[in-house]
Amino acid sequence: MKSFYTYVYLREDGSPYYVGKGTGRRAFEFYGTHRPPNDRSRIQIRFWPDEAMALAYEIYQIDFWGRKDLGTGILRNLTDGGDGTSGYTHSVETRRKLSEAHVGRPLPLSARIKISQANRNRVWSVGSRHKMSASKSGQTHSSETCKKISEAHCGKVLSEETRAKLRKAHQTSQLMKENLRAINERKRERSYAN
């Protein structure tokens, strides 16, 4: 069961600057235009038995303290409250439209850099690696893609260090194939012996 509450963000002098209604971690996370104070002791929370009471108290608090934008008080709220939409879920049609609106839209460079930094030195769990491997299993590049890859590598000069690493990897791969062949051969011999 959800627990509903009203929260008040306080300035350093103790006066309120924002009133809201929430559930879960809403009071502690940044949404929209009003950032919660870094000092969590400057967030006052009051729990209510249901959402209707929480919304009513939010309206009361905003009315009591007044809004800066209307020149009636000290709060930064841009509405009179009571207009929350907790638990709202978009319809399948709306989700489809939102998805289509984002197709082909490239991420900004700043977002790509953040993602890159977050994934740098990331260690994937064994389960995740198996899932990623399984998702690519059986996929092959089209002839057009193969041609593009070939053209991208054409004329590339590899350093001696890189060539040595590739040689070693190839030798290890060949050695593994030979070992597997030998193991399978022994298995076959044993099965014929039985």
Image (cartoon, rainbow, N blue to C red):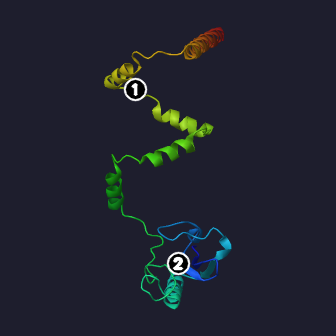
Q: Which residue is mark 1?
A: 140
Q: Secondary structure at mark 1?
A: loop
Q: Is residue 8 above or below residue 131?
A: below
Label 2: few (<14), some (14–19) or many (≥20) C-alpha neighbours in 10 Å: many
Residue 20's label in the rendered image is 2
136 displayed left or right of 2:
left
Q: CA distance from mark 1 to mark 2?
A: 53 Å
Q: Which amino acid lies under the numbered mark 2 shown in the image of this protein?
A: Gly
Of 156 and 147, which appears nearest the observer?
A: 156
Indicate the position of residue 85 as horizontal and vertical percent values. 44, 74
The quadrant of the rendering that contains the C terminus is top right
The quadrant of the rendering that contains the N terminus is bottom right
Residue found 46% across the figure and 76% down from its top: 84
Residue 4's label in the rendered image is none
The tag earlier along the polypeptide, 1 or 2, is 2
Look at discs 1 and 2 and give the one toward the viewer.
2
Of 6 and 128, which appears nearest the observer?
A: 6
Q: Secondary structure at mark 2?
A: strand
Q: Is residue 146 above or below residue 11?
A: above
Q: Is residue 91 above or below residue 54?
A: above
